[in-house]
Amino acid sequence: MIRSMKEHEIYMEEIMNDSKGMDLNELRDYHWVQIGFLQQERLAHLFVTLAFTFLMIIAFAVTYFLPVILMFLLDLLLAVLEVSYIIHYYRLENMVQKWYLIYSKICEMIREEE
């Protein structure tokens, strides 16, 4: 997922640098649709991250009252998954912010053309 988003970002930068004869309005609309897809992906990962956070809190509470080795392993597994989901969500958030900047650049290029 991250690789395809980076490829799209590189593609957009290349087109913007060589935009002669390019319909910038179409490019802006295409990129806006891609931002929408990225926002949906980000929202889905937010829900998954929150779900794992609640599961982790519940597992920690159960471990506190029932300190069994399997519960400690479950806590460790959930903590590792939570960290990986947070890292992925962080990368998605940064990517959408970069894409907003690309969108703003395209809008600025359109204004300069007019």
Image (cartoon, grey):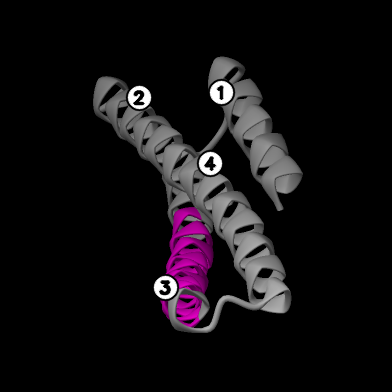
* Residue range (magenta): 35-62
Neighbour tally class for label 3: few under 14, some 14-19, many 20 plus, Cα within 10 Å: some
Q: What is the spatial separation of the Cα atoms under label 3 and label 4, in whole angstroms?
A: 24 Å
**Residue marked by disc 2:** 109
- Main SS of the magenta part reads helix
Marks 2 and 3: in contact by CB < 8 Å?
Answer: no
Mark sitting on residue 19 = 1
* Furthest residue toward top: 17
For residue 53, above or below residue 85:
below
- Kindly report which numbered mark, 3 or 4, lies closer to the viewer in this rendering: 3
Q: Earlier in the sequence, mark 4 or mark 2?
A: 4
Q: Earlier in the sequence, mark 1 or mark 3?
A: 1
Q: At label 2, which amino acid type do we have? A: Met
Mark sitting on residue 57 = 3
**Residue marked by disc 4:** 91
Residue 87 image offset from top left, x and y in percent: 55, 45
Q: Earlier in the sequence, mark 4 or mark 1?
A: 1
